[in-house]
Amino acid sequence: MAAKAGDNPDSLMTLATVFCLRNLRKTMCYQGFRNKLCLRSDIFLPSEICDKLVNTYMELVHTDSNFEPEESFFQLFSDPRSTRLTRVQLREDFVRDRDLEAIRKQDLIELHLTYCNSLSSRSLKTLTCFRETLVSLCLFGCNHIFYRKGGAPLACNEDTEDDEEESPASRQALEMDFNFQGFNRLRLLNLGGLPDEMDAETLLKPLKSLTSLDLSNVQLLGTAFFTQWKDRLASLVLYNVDLSEELVSTVVELINLRKLIHKSHCFFRHLDISRESRRTSKFKMTRKILTAIVQRLINLVSLDISGHVMLDNCTVPHFEEAMGRPSTEPCKSSIYPFQELKRPLQFLGLYDTTLCNVTHIPAYKVTGSKNEDQVLNAIEAYTEFRPELAHRAINQLFDIARIQHCSQLLRALQLVIAALKCHKYDKSIQVTGSAALFYLTNTEYRSDQSVRLRREVIQVVLNGMEQYQEVTVQRNCCLTLCNFSIPEELEFQYSRVNQLLLKILEPARQDESIQRIAVHLCNALVCQVDNHHKEAVGKMGFVKTMLNLIQKKLQDRMCDQVMEFSWSALWNITDETPDNCQMFLNCRGMSLFLECLQEFPDKQELHRNMLGLLGNVAEVKALRPQLLTPQFITVFSNLLDSKADGIEVSYNACGVLSHIMFDGPEVWSMEEPRRDTVMDKMWDAIQSWDVSSRRNINYRSFEPILRLLPQSISPVSQHWATWALYNLVSVYPSKYCPLLIKEGGISLLEKVLELESSQPETKDMARKVMEQCENFKEDPMETNHGQEVNYGQRG
């Protein structure tokens, strides 16, 4: 059988790394002085393992709510004699100055810091410790690293931890003394988001050997300083930089100058002069400028001009375009300047430009909005450093999945999942990403998705629910969860998803649509799960939360889906769980039951759910005395005559009374209603039911019914139990005959036949049940057209 999309297993290295990180004290570490985590003395780890440990640790911190960060984790890598770090990627505010200081003795080759806004200029000093080895450095979005905390000088005490209250650095205390002097091996540098107060030219002046430079969102005061890299520069990113013809000409000319001086191969391969939006740009991209870029940067393999307005017509008129299928051959290009390319580009960014809509584009990978491929390319290219563009592209993917059909399902899901993980704290990404996931996981695409991939979706959805209480995110996430088989597909996160749903339902006045979806999910989650799951959810406050919702609906005098789902959820969670039944009684459940009956006398579904729940309570011997009051018995007795929802309300009311009657006449201390009178009404009700009735109920076990069979205390209870079994094995033989046989029901029915106290009609029905099971054993393939129609719940 072919593997489904996203079914590749984790490597052994990944599994071992995650295991060690979740069990540090049992594998690599011990608890030291003042509970400090210390590396065992017999541990020596090479860079391949250390890099993996640190980078996976960061991923777990940001994407797994069950993972507990370690206060002194980075101290484990403080001694290069036992641990070696070479390539480290850290992100978000979680990273602190002292974390970098802890690894300052390591010979780092790559250090990528992204959106680390808790870092101050204290970390600039730490950076100088890596100056002799560092080849690649990223400080993208680290807005505070060039500011001192509270005006503290740069040369702070290395061992000081007093100022570790990680408040953002003061915006007034700009660090002016730092530059990249001594970083002689540095080749790749990303300073995206450098504060406007910092002079990029002064900061970069010592770096003579850069081959790749990213100055996204940086304010440039001049352009001449680019010439210092004329011999080496291969990649330049100027995203959202205020462009001018002078700046573009400088870039193009310095490359051209290099060719003239050295008469050697030009190595400049990647140029990015894109913008976030056409609306924010004063610079206009002309055909002349674009032609100059193509003509002079002859070895260009990657170009991004997204977000630019084309001042004059760069495209070939439609009637002059080359015939045939879309082509990547430069000579057929629908964009005039690109006809001069020597070969197709590997990458061409045309997002938010009119150029992405033309027929022939000489590039293997194009970003844009014309089709699914361009949109997915945009999400892939812009997610890490340009969430504002990724957000828009994901929104376009949402439209494709909703209105059209997503043909690259695996890639689309993986890209959206990656974006949601990368930007857990970006509300716009969470809104659009969760909306896209709803359509990408629906029934149309489900058969192509592996268990592993669908679990990844569930995890990022739950991350979004945890991070944002905002209505749109919560609604999108809840709707997406509805696309999964519940509870089966959510069981691996069972406790977490229940806690999140109960948190959603806590506010007294929650958004109506979210409330309805969340209650539906809660109901589905406690249906058909083991009792220990139900007990655990009960302890989370499930019963009280549902009763609070019911109380609110009563106050509003509204019986809607939330009301009905809440009672259904209580019916399910109390099934064979005495503790939850006790909670129901303790939280005024019976009072709410009576109020609902009085307020909504004609709501059949509501009555069925409430009586089903009380059937569960009545099955608990220790709780039955609380039901044995004149008021409750009168209500149950009156409901025996109900025709609501077929026989269901009458059947459940009779079930409650059957368990109460089973406790014998000695517990019946009330004068009215009389026990005999109620028993007579029970007999009359059972006689009125059609034994071939199809049911809205689902038994996982017959144990509560079977205990009413071999007894003479209450013949009517015995008759109700026998009727219930006959109805179920007759209408749904393939489901209930095996269950009855498995649970020893046949031998108990034989005892019914032996008891003198058993009524003749009860014995007759017991024989029919036994015959039905015997027939089923002889011909187990026998079916009944009604047997699959069994949508109700009893657990």
Image: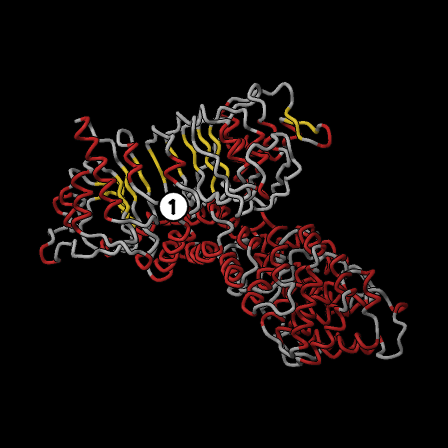
Q: Label 1: how many residues lie within 10 Å, few (<14), some (14-19) or many (20+)?
A: many
Q: Position of residue 356 (x, y in %)?
A: 24, 53
Q: Find numbered disc 1 in the image and state the secondary structure of the residue it sits on.
A: loop
Q: Is residue 184 visible?
A: yes
Find residue 572 and report its horizontal and vertical position in percent. 66, 61
In the depicted view, which residue is nearer to us: 491 or 255? 255
Residue 465 pos. (x, y %): 55, 55
Q: Is residue 517 left or right of residue 159?
A: left
Q: Amino acid at mark 1?
A: Val
Q: Nearer the viewer, residue 709 or 246?
A: 246
Identified at 61% across, 55% down, the residue is 500
Q: Residue tagged by mark 1?
A: 218
**Residue lying at the far left of the rendered structure:** 320
In this rendering, the answer to whether 738 lies above or below 545 is: above
Number of marks drawn = 1
Name the image quarter holding the N terminus.
top left
